[in-house]
């Protein structure tokens, strides 16, 4: 295993998600772990989630409400999300989206970008994954997050989020407009299952990611938070 990053080497992590609650559901424990390791985090949210009304929910200000929910969740990490305000539900790998991402990547100069997987279940997530891949080009390596349910997703990276279970649940619960308990329950199941794949205990949680090496980024192990502890069978 390579050296661990420290606060002094000031690793920079850019997180790019499609909707205001995605970072919380898919990668929040890992963000806590990265921050604990000294990483500086920037969170970009491509849409404001205005298409995410629950059945029977009438909220003319849903975009604003969902932005506020994301801001409230992010207080715990002492970060403020940057909302790109592209249309929710019809996100596409447009030149405008790629340019917006490129300019933020140049300005923030991240060491790693984390986003959705190109095989995610949600069309907005897939479109964003492709746009991020194009914007990142050979400037920065991209790490893909486990999609909901993990269907068809083959992880290459596991992060131990057991110390951050409570922080993750609290962050998801900030998204009151989204009936968050359904995601608390499902994220918990998924993170328990991913920990089980690493022979974790029943109380352990892990988040999973996939890294696909491409020149010149072939090994990013020294930029990752701690993996689950290896236990013998
Ligand atoms: Zn989403």
Image: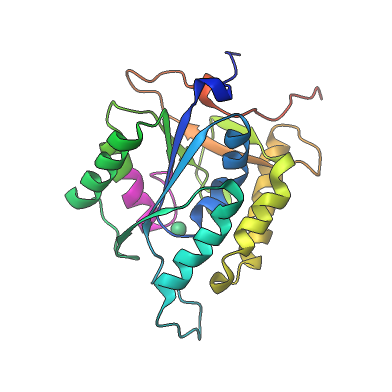
Describe residue 88's horizontal placement relative to residue 93 as left or right.
right
In the picture shown, does residue 31 fall above or below 110? below
Image quadrant where residue 217 sits: top left
User: What segment is highlighted magenta in the picture?
Assistant: 115-130
Describe residue 44's horizontal placement relative to residue 34 as left or right.
left
> Quick one: which residue is furthest to the left in this view?
95
Note whether residue 52 is visible. Answer: no
Q: Nearer the viewer, residue 105 or 156?
A: 105
Q: Nearer the viewer, residue 183 or 11?
A: 11
Q: Indicate whether residue 127 is drawn in magenta.
A: yes
Note whether residue 97 is visible. Answer: yes
In the picture shown, does residue 177 fall above or below 141? below
Describe residue 82's horizontal placement relative to residue 40 as left or right.
left
Return the x and y of residue 182 as percentages of the image width and height. Answer: 63, 66
Which residue sits at x=44%, y=53%? 81
Q: Nearer the viewer, residue 92 or 69?
A: 69
Q: Quadrant of the N terminus?
A: top right
Return the x and y of residue 94 as percentages of the image width and height. Answer: 20, 52
Q: Indicate whether residue 116 is drawn in magenta.
A: yes
Image quadrant where residue 169 sits: bottom right
Tag count in the figure? Answer: 0
Which quarter holds ligand 1? bottom left
Which residue sits at x=41%, y=18%? 218
Q: Quadrant of the C terminus?
A: top right
Which residue sits at x=25%, y=41%? 103
Return the x and y of residue 56 as percentages of the image width and height. Answer: 50, 86
């Amino acid at each position: 295993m390579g050296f661990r990053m420290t606060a002094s080497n000031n690793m920079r992590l850019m997180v790019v998600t499609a909707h205001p609650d995605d970072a919380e559901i898919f990668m929040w424990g890992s963000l806590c772990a990265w921050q604990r390791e000294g990483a500086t985090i920037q969170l970009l949210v491509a849409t404001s989630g205005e298409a995410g009304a629950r059945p029977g929910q009438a909220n003319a200000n849903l975009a604003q409400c969902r932005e506020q929910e994301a801001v409230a969740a992010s207080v715990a990490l002492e970060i403020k999300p940057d909302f790109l305000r592209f249309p929710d539900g019809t996100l596409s790998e447009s030149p405008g989206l790629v340019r917006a991402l490129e300019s933020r990547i140049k300005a923030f100069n991240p060491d790693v970008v984390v986003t959705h997987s190109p095989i995610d279940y949600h069309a907005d997530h897939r479109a964003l994954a492709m746009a991020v891949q194009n914007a990142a080009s050979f400037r920065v390596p991209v790490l893909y997050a486990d999609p909901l349910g993990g269907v068809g997703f083959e992880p290459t990276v596991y992060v131990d989020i057991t110390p951050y279970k409570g922080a993750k649940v609290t962050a998801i619960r900030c998204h009151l407009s989204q009936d968050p308990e359904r995601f608390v329950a499902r994220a918990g199941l998924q993170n328990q299952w991913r920990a089980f794949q690493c022979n974790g205990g029943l109380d352990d949680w892990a988040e999973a990611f996939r890294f696909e090496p491409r020149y010149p980024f072939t090994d990013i192990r020294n930029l990752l938070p701690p993996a689950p502890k290896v236990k013998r069978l």
